[in-house]
Amino acid sequence: MGSTLKTNDFMKIMKERRSIRNYDPTVKISKKEMTEILEEATTAPSSVNAQPWRFLVIESDEGKEKLAKLASFNQSQVTTSSAVIAVFADMNNADYLEDIYLKAVELGYMTQEVKNRQIEALTAHFEKLPAQVNRETILIDAGLVSMQLMLTARAHGYDTNPIGGYDKENIAKVFELEEERYVPVMLLSIGKAAEEGYASYRLPVETIAQWK
């Protein structure tokens, strides 16, 4: 799929990203471009390439009305953004491994022999994998794609805000998703900023890193 990137300057994208709370409500992101953004963001890495992230793009008035009741402290992000992307992690991520690895063979990324060996090993692995370990792994993977999604949005000329303060216990039920399967990770509002975001201080590397 073709890209509509506004900039490829990675340092500019990363260092000028801001968390935005108020957006221009007249700016809408087309389904085509949102698809591009999601497609580009999902080049993020994941454990055994299982790609456990799932996205619910909430952009309709009805959808936002439902979400607003679940995100009471983030009303402006919900109401003014082009969309809010609810990021989930799929506990049944192993169900897609056969499709993923088969496509890798078709694209020439691996041989059929390697694919068969990998699938056999991974099937045995997931059969014994404790649910809590699976959950912890897919949450990490979903965090990776969420950060990449924010940077990708910025490259397209949009702004975002990661939101953790919402009703995670009920969001799957409200949007008619399987509650045991889909683990809520975060909300990401996305749109064109109506006001400039604030810069914020970061701890120096000497404080957060050690060399041994």
Image (cartoon, rainbow, N blue to C red):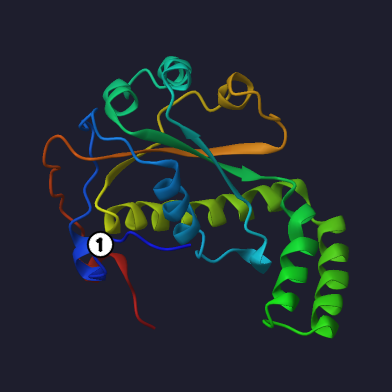
In the picture of the structure, the residue carrying the numbered disc 1 is: 14
Tell me where residue 84 sits by quadrant.
top left
Q: Is residue 151 left or right of residue 200?
A: right
Identify the residue at horizontal 42%, vertical 46% (top origin): 34
Q: Position of residue 64 (x, y in %)?
A: 42, 21
Q: Front-most of 139 and 51?
A: 51
Q: Position of residue 198 (x, y in %)?
A: 13, 44
Q: Quadrant of the C terminus?
A: bottom left
Within 10 angstroms of label 1, few (less than 14), some, or many (20 or more) residues?
A: some
In the rendered view, tell whether residue 10 sits above or below residue 145: below
Q: Is residue 51 left or right of residue 57?
A: right
Q: Front-most of 32 and 100?
A: 32
Tell me where residue 160 sits by quadrant.
top left
Q: Position of residue 1 (x, y in %)?
A: 48, 62
Q: Front-most of 29 and 158?
A: 29
Q: Is residue 137 left or right of residue 29?
A: right
Identify the residue at horizontal 26%, vertical 69% (top origin): 8
In the rendered view, tell whether residue 43 sits above or below residue 162: below
